[in-house]
Image (spheres, grey):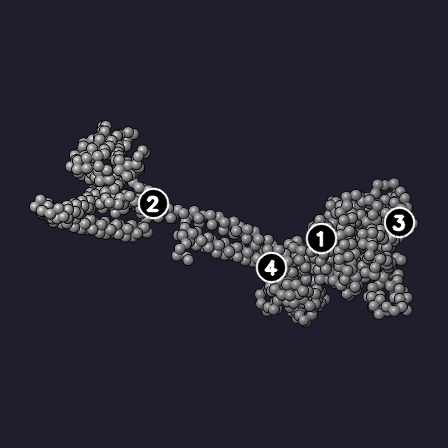
Amino acid sequence: MIARLSIGHRLTVLLAGVAALLSLLSWWMVSELARQAAARSQDNVLAASATTIAETIRSEQGEVRLELPYSALSMLGAISEDRVFYKVVAGERVLTGYDDLPVPTDAATGARVAFETGQYSGEAIRMASVRRTVLAGAGPVPVVVTVAQTLSGVDAVSGQLSRLAAALSLAFFLVAVGLSVFAARASLRPLNAFAQAVSRRGPSDLRPLRRDAPPELAPLRGALNRLMDRLGQSIRRSEDFIAEAAHRVRTPLATVRAQAEIALRSAESEESRQRLRRIIRAVDESSRSAGQLLDHATVAYRAEDLARDRIDLGELVAQAAAALEPTATMKDIAFHIATSQARVVGDAVLLESALGNVLDNAVKYSPDETTVHIAVSAEEGVARITVTDEGPGLGEGPIETLTERFRRGGNTEGVVGSGLGLTIAADVLAAHGGRLDLRNAAEGGGACVTLVLPAD
Amino acid sequence: MRDARLAGGLRLGLRLGLRLGLGLCVGLWATLAAALEVENRKVYPGTTDRTLSIVSTADLEVFEPYIQRFQQSHPELTVDYTVASSVELYRAIRDGAAFDLAISSAMDLQLKLANDGLAQSHRSDRTDALPDWARWRDLIFAFTAEPAVVVMSSRALDGAPPPATRQELITLLRDNPERFRNAIGTYDVRDSGLGYLFATQEARSTDAYWRLSEIMGRLSPELYCCSGQMVDAVISGRLSLAYNVLGSYAAQRMAQEDRRDIEIVQMQDFANLMLRTAIIPATATQTTAAGALIDMLLELGLRETPGDWPLPPLSQGTSDFGPIRLGPALMVYLDPFNRRAFLAEWENALVQDIVIEP
């Protein structure tokens, strides 16, 4: 569950969680401090009040006397509307005040001023006691003055500050959440940039990544580069293998074909000749397929390190047409070539192979005694070679898939083919930054294949 | 306005108690009567038996309009109104007498009741509208602000302008002892809760108080329990000067009598401003009704113009010296040590050859 959560969300949630914790902590701390400060100021006033009373204590004719100063209680009334209680005890005798008011336990023994929280008259109270010894009658008499106040004032002040602290903590938390989102995005930016750099690459681009990355991403970059390196090697090995295999198959096939032709010439019965012709056709197809496999391997191999020749497309077309002339003549197919000036920069071998495959397809699928139109054009930085035939067209199926390996059109029954021709052409064009456009010719069917290349 | 009456009480309570003792509800009333010296009592019947019992220092005739107004909006409530002195009222609530509302002019005693947990809290929009100085802890609410004044007959002034400060009053008394001998009236602070409150607050606020008391003491003053009697004595010509009289009451009486030869003087150097306060005692049972009555009193207390009501609104509380502050400091002079010391000093000053009236 958490493993599937986005890193951005995790970071945001974690940072927000930390912020929430800190907010709560700060709220609690401020509340606690406010409560203590309020309690302490109440303690101070209580102590001052008790001290003021204690200072009026005197001995008159052997009796302990005192006077409750107005300020003693008015200072308590000034800080809050709390109830006030007091009690003065001399020795064991309550001199004045609330008889049953509790007294801090260490009032008689401990420090001069003692504080305690207690319960009186149904409410929590804070007591402060001041001890003083007065010489009265036979000897010294300890006098303890206790002043007490209820806690609603302290509660009100600390409650108010606590609410204020809560509001501030909440604001702090909200700001922190905003910053967490920002921080999560900022720290993920290099990762996203890295991912984009990888995903922007072409399908066969296996060059190592050279991009600068934060140290945390360096292992990932290294692993990716090693993976791509291994992948590239493995692809190359299999291409080599295919090329080697195709090459090895082609040579014996040529021998088989030569032998079959000799046998055809010396064959006497028509039945034998028929058989031998079928053998020769099959051998031709196998040899063609092997050639295409070899082409394909060449494309894959050379695309990685493209030669950059200046090529005149008119010449290219002329050569390709010339190469297919014998096959075309066998079917009485004429080439109609319309060229205009168009130059590209690229790998002549690959482009020749691409065009050859497209023309080969056109010848293969054209009925006898038809014309294949080849047009070369260049405009707006784009060079085009358009090959139009009068054959059955590209069929009903999805046209884009025809450039996939070993994929053949839906109307190719009766025609032998490997399904590699368009794949090779498309790969070559892609390697040159161009593309292969496939469509059915407008009138009367026929395929229209366009090789699109960036012009020189 | 009988604010305190310990010595001169009519002991109506005992009489009522005896009378009712013949009836069926002997027990309760007898104990109540024993706890409280009742000066006056009246029941204002409502449509039901639900009774709101009030104990107050305000006289019947003063408070009756308020009760009538209250019963207009709460006709179902029977109101049982008992008049007692502030000290008696304090003692009764302290001893747990069952009243739903206690209204007194002795702020210190009321505050002590509230402080000692003998009052219930009440909160409403009306109490929230009160200024801070007119309430304490949602327990005690002021609904009038009544200044202490000096009432003098013009005859005693003999054409001179009335004294504006205590110093001028001292000079007047010192220079004309013959006019004021046996003709000064003031509170007997030993019996009157309000008198004691006025005296202690004044002694705290101005040192002229003791000098004035000394002078008055030499002129054999008459000591009263209540403002009303002092004002009546000035009107009847028995007194030339009544010191520390409730201004509201004096003004009302002057208006009734239409006496232009009597001056009501407010001292400029310091003047006490008493707040009449209400609390809901802890023993109250009709707390909702008591709260409603408090709200009505506060509504009247917050009115802008005096109007026809017998008691003045709170708006006077914002005058020069401000009201006596509601707070625990009021309890200072209730401490037995302080009280003993203060009364001793007061007696030294004022009771030089004592005449107590009536």
* Mark 4 and mark 1: Cα distance apart in space: 32 Å
| CB atoms of marks 4 and 2 within 8 Å | no
* Mark 3 and mark 1: Cα distance apart in space: 42 Å
Tell me: A176 left or right of A129.
Answer: left
The front one of B221 and B332 is: B332
Which residue bears the numbered disc 1?
A: B124
User: Do badges 3 and 4 share one subunit?
Assistant: no
Q: Which mark is residue A196?
A: 2
| CB atoms of marks 4 and 1 within 8 Å | no
Amino acid under disc 4: Asp
For label 4, the SS is: helix
Which residue bears the numbered disc 4?
A: A43
* Mark 4 and mark 2: Cα distance apart in space: 66 Å
Amino acid under disc 1: Ser
Query: Which of the two marks, 3 or 1, is nearer to us in this view?
Result: 1
Amino acid under disc 3: Val
| CB atoms of marks 2 and 3 within 8 Å | no
Query: Which of the two marks, 2 or 1, is nearer to us in this view?
Result: 2
Q: Chain of mark 2?
A: A
Residue A357 is situated, as x and y percent measured from the top left of the image, at 21, 40
Q: Residues within 10 Å of mark 4 (few under 14, many from 20)?
A: many
Q: Is residue B191 visible?
A: no
* Mark 2 and mark 3: Cα distance apart in space: 105 Å
User: Do badges 2 and 3 share one subunit?
Assistant: no
Which residue bears the numbered disc 3?
A: B234
Query: Which of the two marks, 3 or 4, is nearer to us in this view?
Result: 4
